[in-house]
Image (cartoon, helix red, strand yellow):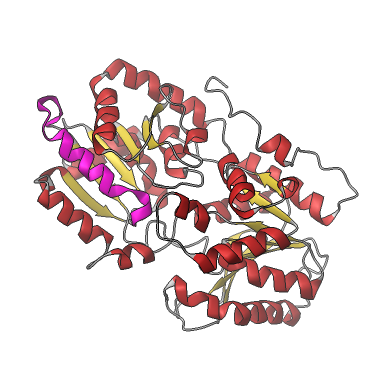
Amino acid sequence: MAEPTGRAIAVVSVHASPLSELGRGDNGGMNIGVRRLCEGLAERGVPTDVFVRRDDPHLPAERLIAPGSRLVLLDVGPPHPIPKQELPALLDPFADALLAHAASESRSYRLVHAHYWLSGPPARRVRERLGIPWVQSFHSLARMKEAAGLPPDLERGRVEEVLAAECDRMVAMSRAEGRALVRLYGANPVRICVAEPGVDLHPADPAAVAELRDELDVAGRRVVLFAGRLEPLKGADTLIEAIAEMDREPHLQDVVCLFIGDDSGDGARASHGGERRRLERLADRAGILDRIRFLGAVPHERLARYYALADVCVVPSRVETFGLVALEAQAQGTPVVASHVGGLPEVVADEETGKLVEGREPRDYCAAISAILHDEAGRERMGEAARRRAATFSWGRMVDLLLSIYGRVSSPEIPAELPCGYEVSLAAEAPPVSA
């Protein structure tokens, strides 16, 4: 499978495989983003090798992501999942294993693209050894979380600052992330590019949605949906408290709230018994267990029917770099109630495709959800606007932007075809809903 021309791109994703099931452990939007990137590059004739630490002894050493794109599992550390706080000690051995793998195949690379802060140090080693450019995507930032009131991670923040200073180019998922890199890390704005994720626009099959409604026994009931990893930063407790507020309203007695997702690594450590157990206890104390259903992880290819089933999707995150769940829900014509944080205001058009909520007051979320549920005609208008909004985001555009970024760092003498600077990408207005 070796490709000697040097056109291939090395993708480093130490802890998150693009082929892992979403909603379990720490798997989420980053996994699907890396997968769609590799698939899009493959369609454009650009091969990729994605390097991930092996965490399952039964998986093959290599798997195909798309023609020309392969997933390579490196045997570094124990072959099973380990807490993320144990991974930094394995980053030097990971870099050694990656370089040894490339040498064993006489494999050359055009550049290395690291995803998440843990992948940055190995990517820096690859740049030093192979003399190729290094592009860094963070996906989330420790200091953004700290600014939102979550516990600080001083060591991670320090490493992220070093990575931002030393990499050749940073890729932000939203203008909000780009601004945070400048404000919280002192990053050089001219080396920041924004490449927003896309969304699959295929509408869910109405027959499959009707079947799911019967399967969940929610016929005749209005449905509020939460989808995401269960961990404190996702704010699911705020939604449960908002449902408790609804329980006092006579016209909202039919509402049921579905939670899709399992405990992440952080969620499992969040409290005794994990985040899901904490949320169940919270619902029990509020007397609303009969209105709350925890469905666990759902395969990503089935999520569209859950979004389509819901009357409202709620994204109450304390911090959100982009907000892929909000975008996926809108693609299915479902209005979104989301917290006014991070990249969510770039995804959700307030009062047009949903509602943005300032702060963490449950009754404000209750009011926003109730307003959408109460106005059926308005909900239909929001749903149509949501579809149009989602159509302005595409995986193809993201891949083209990243190819432009790759061109700038690997062939700086050749002008890029697409704008790629802070002044253009971070200051640009969000696409209009009617586009």
Looking at the picture, how far across and down is residue 355, in whole percent?
Answer: 38, 28
Looking at the picture, how far across and down is residue 324, in whole percent?
Answer: 47, 44
Which image quadrant for residue 24? bottom left
| Picture residue at 11% right of the left edge, 45% below the top | 290
Q: Residue furthest right?
A: 413
Q: Is residue 371 above or below residue 279?
A: above
| Picture residue at 66% right of the left edge, 33% below the top | 427
**Of the pair 308 and 243, the residue shown nearer to us:** 243
Q: Is residue 78 left or right of residue 255?
A: right
**Of the pair 149 and 9, the residue shown nearer to us:** 149
Q: Which residues are magenta?
A: 231-253
Q: Is residue 209 visible?
A: yes
The number of callouts visible is 0
Which image quadrant for residue 23? bottom left
Looking at the picture, how far across and down is residue 200, in whole percent?
Answer: 50, 40
In which quadrant of the rendered image does the C terminus lie? top right
Q: Is residue 179 above or below residue 273?
A: above
| Picture residue at 51% right of the left edge, 83% below the top | 77
Q: Is residue 110 left or right of residue 257?
A: right
Q: Is residue 107 visible?
A: no
